[in-house]
Image (cartoon, rainbow, N blue to C red):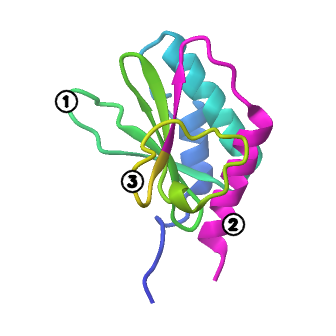
Amino acid sequence: MKKSGPPKVESAARESASGQGGAKIQYPGDWRDEMLSRLRDLINQADPEMVEEYKWKKPSKPEGTPVWYHRGIICTGETYKSVVKLTFARGAMLPDPAGLFNSSLDGNVRRAIDFNEGDKINEKALKALIRAAVALNTSP
């Protein structure tokens, strides 16, 4: 049987991500930082057992990309010049009655939500989407 997701390091990952245990990961320092921080809060509210890790560090992005796990990847959070992108690893299999997915719609697996400066977050729908992704990862 294939092992899914990283080893459980929840408290360390959560403390590091929140700035309580280690150096806080720094993002662009503008609206994108605020948006990603708000999305992080909503993800953790939707699933308190979520694990956050930073992957894919490179010279152009030394802080890496936040990746949220619950028995496999749920989503990633990426900052670009004009958007903050929340990409759901198995988004094509998720119900999206609120129509949150607005990017990567032509793929067979992933779906994404692009947040622009000034966008309001449909918190209720986003939390429902997170919970649906967790349910998909934890179903037999």
Residue 135 image label = 2
Cα separation, mark 1 vs mark 2, equals 35 Å
Q: Which residues are magenta?
A: 112-140
First-in-chain label (2 vs 3): 3
Q: Nearer the viewer, residue 122 or 3?
A: 122
Identity, as a three-letter code, of the amino acid under mark 3: Gly
Looking at the picture, how far across and down is residue 112, in whole percent?
49, 42
**Residue beneath disc 1:** 59
Q: Nearer the viewer, residue 79 or 29?
A: 79
**Residue 96 in the image: above or below residue 94:** above
Does the magenta run of residues contain 133?
A: yes
Contact between labelled residues 2 and 1, with CB atoms less than 8 Å apart = no
Residue 107 image label = 3
Left or right of 90: which side holds 97?
Answer: right
Identity, as a three-letter code, of the amino acid under mark 1: Pro
Identity, as a three-letter code, of the amino acid under mark 2: Ala
Residue 19 image label = none
**Residue 16 in the image: above or below residue 52:** above
One can see residue 21 in this view:
no
Look at 49% across and 48% down and name the residue there.
111
